[in-house]
Image (spheres, rainbow, N blue to C red):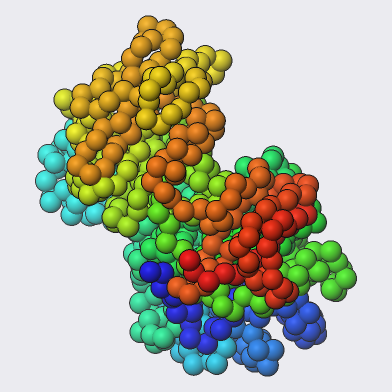
Amino acid sequence: MVKKYPPIHHKVKHMIHGADYNPDQWMRTPEVWDEDMRLMKLAHSNSMSVGIFAWAALEPEEGRFEFGWLDEIMEKLYKNNAYVILATPTGARPAWMSAKYPEVLRVQANRRRNLHGTRHNHCYTSPVYREKTRIINTKLAERYGNHPSLVLWHVSNEYGGECHCELCQEAFRNWLREKYDDDLDKLNHAWWTAFWSHTYTDWSQIESPAPHGEFLVHGHNLDWKRFVTHQTLDFFKHEIATLKEITPDIPVTTNFMGTYPGLDYWKLAPHMDVVSWDSYPMWHSKDNWEVGCSTAFLHDINRSLKGGKPFMLMESTPSATNWQPVAKLKRPGMHVLSSIQAVAHGSDSVQYFQWRKSRGSSEKFHGAVVDHVGNENTRVFRDVADVGKILEKLDDVVGTTVRPEVAVIYDWENRWAIDDAQGPRREKKDYQLTCERHYKAFWKRGIPVDVINMDCDFSRYKLLIAPMLYMVRPGVAERMEKFVESGGTLIVTYWSGIVDENDLCFLGGFPGPLRKVTGIRSEEIDALYDEDYNYAVFDKDNPLKLEKEYKTVELCDLIHAETAKVLATYKEDFYAGRPALTVNEFGKGKCYYIAFRSGDDFLSDFYGRLIEDLDIQRVLDIDLPEGVTAQKRSDGDNDFIFVMNFAGDQRTVDLGDEELTDMIDGGQVKGEITLPAYGLRILKRPVR
Ligand code: GLA
Ligand code: ZN
């Protein structure tokens, strides 16, 4: 049964529609502030995220605080009936702080300390930075904690990067000592330091990876990345401790960046009340069908990070960015489609960076709701208002979610290990892309999918897909066995079960701990040049009823079936006739092993069969034309269905006899509907 979550804050009754608002850039022309309030209404916007990067305006000199301007802004927003999302300003620090306390500045991997400048240029360990953070966060919480408009803390901004200063080195060593029970021998074994005589004989010899020092010890790299996540989380906890103490009822978030490689978001999510993220797809850079799928995958990670709880689209651009290689404008329709796509996947907000375009500095050409012209008479402003008008009809969708029957595992630590591995190919290891391609077989059919990591509970799914599960952490294989034994279907692919949590290879046969559940043994893996290929040929009477020969590319695992049955074999080369696809009956369930990398054709056909066999529900029980997908959210009584056309031209969808209600115009809909280029419909039906 799908449950409905409470809203982000009990005051929030509607979908949030707002933007990063930086009135501190317009102090010289405060009349702009009143104009902003007028425009906010016209944009059908009900929220502003204030104070991100405002430290210099809030504390212009050490210990001298200026809250007058923010008081005024809060008051204006209150009068405008806006929800305020208030930021802690730690994403960038004032110049006086860097000048007086150089330790707050970050040290790069090459051990050079940065000068003052840019943002995200601070040490997460520095006691001075932490103390200055505590002071400003305390002041903000005390002053605005009871403000009637405040609904959420936006903690810092896009945590990221790493610091290699002496304070961080010390913290890294302490973290390692704790992890390895103060036993250097354990660390030496875990990092396999006997290789190239890298054995450490004293903790003080250990440093963070460096381009002019150690960077090839995979266990070391992995632990450093884990430490960076740990230390960032520690800083985040430090920030929220102050906020939670003074304002226990105000939820906290910090904005994520998709699959940003520097932080394992699964470690941060439990400490957030609501997950939020900043989405900047490169629409129109290639087929929007592809871009739409990759973006959906990211939205689904954000929904899965808190087990299905709605998330927030904290930032997106109303038009173009200033940092993508080509700042192509969103074509008519795309702004509404891309915004509502986030909602379709579980977002309870559509927010932008930023409200009013900066006049100077590096982001002066980044898309914003209000352009340099300063009024509402722009295409972009009208697009934003259109999103607002749609969101106003979606109160019933707030807090609803979806309970997918399918999950794809995308795991940060696994990705770190794969990216670091030297072999079997340098290029095109493509872990994320591979996960997305498995995901696509469902997305394009309008089947909801969770994107989880390997530590999540598998028992709520019918079908669990673990592409390229190169690293298998302790206990994961056992949980997979249990999942299959109890009737689940598990998909494992080539290059799985290779290393343990320390990036040490499993001995005694791959796929290591997955050997039992897969029922196969992998002896070698063949890497193909880009122009090479082989084929997987299906046995005549295979139960999947697949008949084609499918091209295999890039990576072909050479496996032996142990307890598994062979469904397809390789066609050519010295491994012709050897297994390419197997299935292992295990308890009440099945585990398939796909030994080869393929194109979308195989994945689509293969999953098409499994969807039938396992009776996996599509959101709409119809075949969707290419370009159109559907997602749903549910409150237990009603399904809210989002039918979205990512194609650049019109598509017709036949809904059949089922009668649905259009949530925007209230009309009844059945039979054929026509979606214009980038068009969408939001439909409601009672839960079946
Ligand atoms: C990020 C940041 C914003 C802004 C945008 C520009 O998401 O959080 O401050 O720089 O990028 O795209
Ligand atoms: Zn540091």
Q: Nearer the viewer, residue 504 or 225?
A: 504
The number of discs equals: 0
* Residue at x-position 47% and y-position 17%: 535
Name the residue: 69% across, 71% down: 668
**667 to 210, vertically: above or below:** below
Looking at the picture, how far across and down is residue 620, in whole percent? 56, 56
Point 41% across, 73% down: residue: 3
In the rendered image, is residue 407 in sight? Answer: yes
Q: In screen coordinates, is 144 left or right of 175?
A: right
Is 626 on the left-hand or right-hand side of 386?
left
Residue for point 62% across, 42% down: 290
What is the quadrant of residue 220 in the picture?
Answer: top left
Where is residue 662 shown, x and y percent of the image? 68, 70
Q: Nearer the viewer, residue 659 or 197?
A: 659
State the quadrant of the N terminus.
bottom left
**Residue 164 visible at all:** no
Q: Quadrant of residue 585?
A: top left
Most extreme residue toward the front is 657
User: Along the line of sight, which residue is nearer the eye, 628 or 12?
Assistant: 628
- The picture places residue 43, in percent across and down from the top left corner, at 75, 76
* In this view, 673 is above or below 509: below
Q: Residue furthest top?
A: 574
Quadrant in the picture for residue 675? bottom right
Q: What percent of the width, then of the height, locates residue 293?
A: 58, 47
Above or below residue 273? Residue 478 is above
Image position of 525 (left or right of 616): left
